Amino acid sequence: MLKYNVRGENIEVTEALRDYVEKRLTKLEKYFDLSQDVIAHVNLKVYRDHSAKVEVTIPLPYLVLRAEETTDDMYRSIDFVSEKLERQIRKYKTRVNRKSREKGVEEFFVPEEAAPAEEKEEKTPMFKIVRNKRVNLKPMDPEEAILQMDMLEHDFFVFQDAETNGTSVVYRRNDGSYGLIETNE
């Protein structure tokens, strides 16, 4: 069952808004066999130009789903984010389940990166770090890392190579292909 952690930045999260978020995201439950409670982290933001941004992160036992959308209407942003998450699930579900079967894991999703990381600000004399993330590296092959990178809509992904046990990075190249950086450990 999905539980919801709904936060607002520059907006009060009303009961109607919370209910609408839950109504839209509950539709995603049909894609999973959720034997335990999963928390959907929803962040609602309103900017000075009155645009509304919705960010949703759903850390599942073997996968992290994430989507964000900005429009001129909060309810439309919520609709677009839920549609984006549903498309993401449908697009990758077959590939992820196939990979699970190859590994002999129950068919759901493949082990990936940990839940969303903590954020904090630090100041240094030469540059300013505005975000710091900590992740637990899970063993996987480069193909699984590319799959996770695409699902998170990131340009790179750090992972532990299951074959070498070394830390590796996959990244998206300018021409649309992928690159792999391996460490000598």
Image (tube, grey):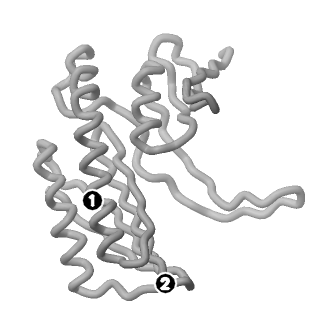
The numbered mark at residue 82 is 1
Q: Is residue 129 left or right of residue 60?
A: right
Q: Is residue 148 above or below residue 7?
A: above
The total number of labels drawn is 2
Q: Locate residue 11, reporting x and y percent.
A: 42, 86
Q: Locate residue 150, reporting x and y percent.
A: 44, 37
Q: Quadrant of residue 37?
A: bottom left
The type of residue carrying mark 1 is: Ser
Q: CA distance from mark 1 to mark 2?
A: 21 Å
Q: Quadrant of the N terminus?
A: bottom left
Q: Is residue 46 above or below residue 124?
A: below
Q: Quadrant of residue 26?
A: bottom left
Q: Could you tell me if residue 133 is visible in this image?
A: yes
- Which residue is at a point 41% across and 35% down the rendered structure image? 148
Q: Is residue 54 left or right of residue 103?
A: right
Q: Quadrant of the C terminus?
A: top right
- Which residue is at a point 78% across and 60% down the rendered structure image? 128
Q: Is residue 171 left or right of residue 107?
A: right
Q: Which residue in the structure is indicated by mark 2?
A: 50
Mark 1 burial class by Cα count in 10 Å: few <14, some 14-19, many 20+: many
The type of residue carrying mark 2 is: His
Q: Locate residue 116, reporting x and y percent.
A: 44, 52
Q: Nearer the viewer, residue 43 or 111?
A: 43
